[in-house]
């Protein structure tokens, strides 16, 4: 059994949907969460910028004692997983492959929608991972059609804590409408910010569409690596951000519905500039 520090990161508050799942399913597991709030949203940046930012964060988490890295961020998983795995001395978990396998198993009509930021949606990562999952499943599933939609307005809304507002509803109607018209029966939340929007998404799509939250599969990967659901002792989660820690505490508390306090600011810009 392993019980070392779990390092998770995202561009902002989104990866908290993954961290919270780890917190609930592996109670007592120590984790350090890094939110790159000075650079959110990643979806409006270039792939090269995201790779630099992610490398600096990953190096920081390993230097801080992380025994495993969880990319609680689809954009990082799409663009920087191989890069970080190439040098990391600890295992690195991405979130796209496992979610794609789940989507391929879940779909009945083979039409899978993916909502994500424009960078992830345009990366081809979900199409590739779903095609791979379908071919691994061989005869068990038929062909799948994967329809990614870039949703630039959603991350800023979630970062502002606006997950039930009329603006959030209007944006979701706009992004989900074309997917409904295509007849999707499965929707992948291709951004870790979006689970905070699930009540609205489920209401808009209705019960006929299965919603896949990649966070669920991260815990299974941690358990496969040796982390146990019954960790000894109580570990206090640590939160770090590159932007304003009080802003993060406020938004995280609002979104999670429990107090998040004591977040500290860490400036990684020098390391990011130094590249990787
Ligand atoms: N939450 C991240 C993801 O899963 C990044 C979103 C963003 O900053 O655009 O892709």
Image (cartoon, rainbow, N blue to C red):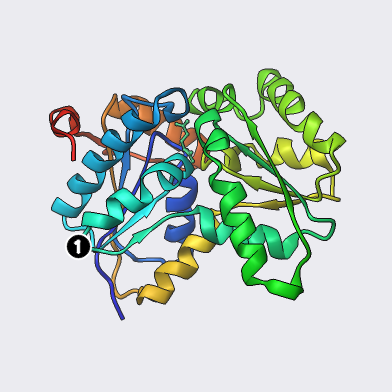
How many numbered marks does the figure carry?
A: 1
Q: Position of residue 185 (x, y in %)?
A: 81, 50
- Residue drawn at (69%, 73%), measured in percent from left and top? 138
Give the class, few, some or many, for how many residues have Cα within 10 Å of label 1's Cα (few <14, many ≥20).
Answer: some
Q: Position of residue 22 (x, y in %)?
A: 44, 60
Report whether residue 236 is seen.
no
Q: Which quadrant of the rendered structure holds the C terminus?
A: top left
- 169 up-or-down from 50: above or below: above
Looking at the image, which residue sits at the far top?
A: 167
Specify whether 107 is left or right of 7.
right
| Residue under numbered circle 1 | 89
The picture quadrant where one finds residue 90 is: bottom left
- Residue drawn at (22%, 49%), measured in percent from left and top? 61
Q: Nearer the viewer, residue 26 or 95?
A: 95
- Asked whether mark 1 and ligand 1 are closer than 8 Å, the reply comes as no
Specify whether 263 is left or right of 70.
left
Q: Position of residue 151 (x, y in %)?
A: 61, 27
- 228 up-or-down from 10: above or below: below
Report whether residue 9 is seen.
yes
Q: Which quadrant of the rendered structure holds the N terminus?
A: bottom left
The picture quadrant where one finds residue 99 is: bottom right
Secondary structure type for disc 1? loop
Looking at the image, which residue sits at the far bottom?
A: 1
The picture quadrant where one finds residue 30 is: bottom left
Specify whether 6 is left or right of 156.
left
- Residue drawn at (57%, 23%), measured in percent from left and top? 152
- Residue drawn at (58%, 48%), measured in percent from left and top? 126
């Amino acid at each position: 059994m392993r019980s070392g520090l779990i390092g998770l990161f995202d561009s902002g508050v989104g990866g908290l949907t993954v961290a919270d799942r780890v917190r609930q399913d592996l109670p007592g597991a120590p984790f350090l969460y890094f939110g790159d709030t000075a650079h959110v949203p990643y979806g409006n940046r270039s792939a090269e910028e995201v790779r630099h930012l992610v490398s600096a964060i990953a190096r920081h988490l390993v230097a801080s004692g992380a025994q495993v890295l969880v990319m609680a961020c689809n954009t990082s998983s799409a663009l920087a997983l191989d890069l970080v795995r190439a040098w990391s001395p600890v295992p690195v978990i991405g979130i796209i492959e496992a979610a794609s396998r789940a989507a391929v198993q879940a779909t009945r009509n083979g039409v899978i929608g993916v909502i994500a930021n424009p960078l992830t949606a345009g990366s081809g990562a979900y199409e590739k991972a779903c095609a791979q999952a379908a071919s691994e499943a061989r005869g068990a599933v038929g062909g799948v059609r994967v329809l990614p939609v870039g949703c630039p307005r959603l991350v800023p809304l979630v970062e502002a804590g606006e997950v039930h507002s009329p603006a959030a509803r209007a944006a979701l109607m706009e992004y989900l409408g074309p997917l409904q018209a295509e007849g999707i029966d499965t929707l992948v939340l291709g951004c870790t910010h979006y689970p905070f929007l699930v009540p609205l998404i489920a209401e808009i799509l209705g019960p006929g569409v299965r919603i896949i939250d990649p966070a669920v599969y991260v815990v299974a990967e941690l358990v496969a690596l040796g982390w146990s659901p019954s960790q000894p002792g109580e570990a206090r989660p640590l939160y770090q951000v590159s932007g304003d820690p009080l802003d993060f505490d406020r938004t995280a508390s609002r979104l999670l519905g429990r107090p998040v306090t004591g977040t500290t600011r860490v400036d990684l810009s020098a390391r990011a500039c130094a590249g990787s």
